[in-house]
Image: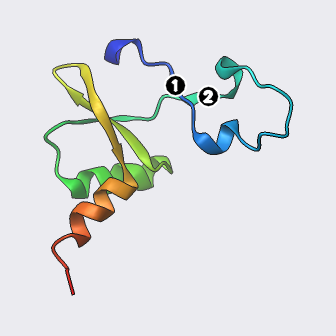
Amino acid sequence: DLDHTIGLLYLDDALPLEQEEKNITKTMRKAPPSIDFHAPLESALAQMAEYHTSVLIAEKDGKVAGLLTLTAINKQIFQSYSL
């Protein structure tokens, strides 16, 4: 059950601020799919494409180890391509 993760609240779901107050439980998105902590980045990209998401739960020994975002993957890939 990945440490009982039930969902994520994205910043763009909580905004714009001028709207009426929202309930977190009703606003948050279902938990994104998980991927093994040691999986290659290519597998993470493929899974993100398959599930149409930009974030995965990184899983280690059945527990949440962190969040893997498309932004973090891009930084890691393009870090070696300095001008």
Q: The disc labelled 2 sits on which kind of residue?
A: Met
Where does the C terminus fall, quadrant-wise?
A: bottom left
The numbered dot on residue 17 is none
The x and y percentages for residue 70 are: 38, 55
Mark earlier in primary sequence (1, 2): 1
Vertical side of 68 occupied by 28: above or below: above
Q: Which residue corresponds to the image point at 16% horizontal and 20% vertical from the top-left?
A: 61
Q: CA distance from mark 1 to mark 2?
A: 6 Å
Q: Which residue corresponds to the image point at 33% horizontal and 18% vertical from the top-left?
A: 2
Give the residue at mark 1: 7
Q: Neighbour class for label 1 at 10 Å: few (<14), some, many (≥20)?
A: some
Vertical side of 34 occupied by 54: above or below: below
Q: SS at mark 1? A: strand
Confirm or deny contact between disc 1 and disc 2 (CB under 8 A): yes
The x and y percentages for residue 27 are: 69, 28
Q: Is residue 66 left or right of residue 54?
A: left
Q: The disc labelled 1 sits on which kind of residue?
A: Gly
The x and y percentages for residue 41 are: 22, 55
The x and y percentages for residue 73 are: 29, 57
Vertical side of 52 occupied by 37: above or below: above
Which quadrant of the view contains residue 75? bottom left
Give the residue at mark 2: 28
